[in-house]
Image (tube, rainbow, N blue to C red):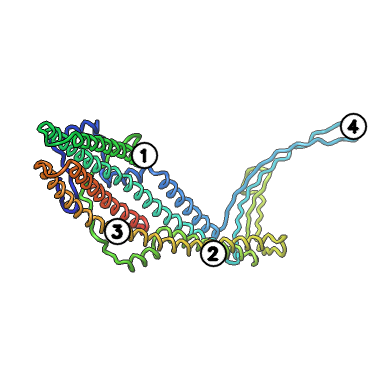
Amino acid sequence: MALLGGLVVCWPAAGGATAWAQAQGPALPAMTLDEAIEAALRHSPQIAQAEGAIRNAESGTRTAWGSYLPNLSFSTGGSRRSSEIFNPTTNTMVKSDASVGYNAGLSSSIDLFTGGRRGAEMNRARADEISAEAGLVQQRFAVILNTKRAFFEVLRADELIRVSELRLQRAQEALEAAERRAQVGTATQSDILRAQLEVANARQALLQAQNQKTVGAFALGRLVGVSGPVGARQGEQLAFEPLQLNREELVAEVLRQAPAVRAAQAAADAASAGARAARAQYLPTISASGSYNLSNREIDLGTSNKSWNLSLSLSYPIFNRFQREANVSRANVQADIAAAQLADAKRAARADLERVLGALELAQEQIKLTEEAVRVAQEDLRLQQERYRLGVSTILDQVASQANLVQAEVNHINARFDFQTAKAELEALLGRSL
């Protein structure tokens, strides 16, 4: 075992490495963290849904722009009709000449004044587009966070397997030493039984770590779009440097541009614009329209009858059975709800920031403490092994030292990956990489 740059690396002995490889079975297809994130973003249904929301929002913005433009329509038709008339002289039905007609027309209309409704709808469409974009960023970092969690769980399981393998190797060596001492009469049967118990516990811990890796590998495989387990390949050394921003800067950034806050702000803006659009119903609508028509008994533009029409209209609903008031009331309620949700989103972002920063600071301190604990436990185990070899201590002392070392190693592994997970949560909260 070596302690390199804050990372505990456990190197199994030659025989132990072979046993460990055999226990693991065939090697899993592995990805680096960047490869896993890229694949997860490509296969995520949440990302597809967020991108679809952006396309819908862009279409809504286009529609809002279109309300400033006139609509244009073209119509044409033809008819042929014959009729019979009654001749009273002959008391018979007489066919008349067939009546043929053709017509074509072009018409257009535009709203000249809508009481501010079009402008409010344009603002709402833009706010919806901003909200969709913020939602995509939020979903993107949520997928990245879930991928990192799954990736780190596989790496954590790999290291726990190595720790468990070393524990099993030490337990087997202790059992062999107890058996040798029992043969020469310097150890009791109890020593052998305690050593056998430690071997059994070490094997159980190894099986648990292997199962943890299997579960994590399948979870990672699902995220990256693979129907099976995927291993984690560490492309570069995980960094444990402190953050470059202080707490005040992080608070300001979270309240300003956190994806959840931006989405809530855009939703509040959209609801406010919707309320203004509803109030526009209290103002009249002024529209202009025009048409140009051709009609003839045959298809001939030169001899067709031509007509045109221009009109200007004003409409104002004096009373529509309180529907206007109900629309305004509903829009105002939605605006009030969106404002409350925005305030809550800011408070939630602030609380999440404190939680994540607390987890980061705790993990940083635990990394330092567990590094020292591993070093102390290694030295204590070395001394206990030597004392037991000389016959001045019992196997119980050695087993206790082994358990202390294993716990220190596990705590160090957990602290390192807790730091990485907390950092990923902070990046998801801010909506950017650190």
SS for dot 1: helix
Residue 129 percent location from the top left of the image: 46, 57
109 relative to 40 in the view: left or right? right
Q: Are marks 2 and 4 in contact (CB under 8 Å)?
A: no
Residue type, label 2: Ser
Q: How far apart are labels 1 and 2 at the CA level? A: 41 Å
Residue type, label 4: Asn
Residue type, label 3: Leu
Identify the mark at residue 362; answer none if there is no mark: 3
Of the residues under marks 1 and 4, which one precedes in the sequence?
A: 4
Residue 284 versus residue 400 in the image, above or below = below
Which quadrant holds the N terminus? top left
Q: Nearer the viewer, residue 282 or 3?
A: 3
Identify the mark at residue 222; answer none if there is no mark: 1
Residue type, label 1: Arg
Q: Residues within 10 Å of mark 2 (few under 14, many from 20)?
A: many
Q: Is residue 123 visible?
A: no
Identify the residue under disc 2: 272
Q: Residues within 10 Å of mark 4 (few under 14, many from 20)?
A: few
Q: How far apart are labels 1 and 3 at the CA level? A: 31 Å
SS for dot 3: helix
Nearer to us: label 3 or label 2: 3
Nearer to us: label 4 or label 3: 3
Nearer to us: label 1 or label 2: 1
Q: Nearer the viewer, residue 295 or 1?
A: 1
What residue is shown at x 20% (from left), y 47% (from top)? 405
Identify the residue under disc 4: 91
User: Which image quadrant is residue 337 in?
Assistant: bottom right
Residue 87 percent location from the top left of the image: 87, 35
Which quadrant holds the C terminus? bottom left
Identify the mark at residue 371; answer none if there is no mark: none
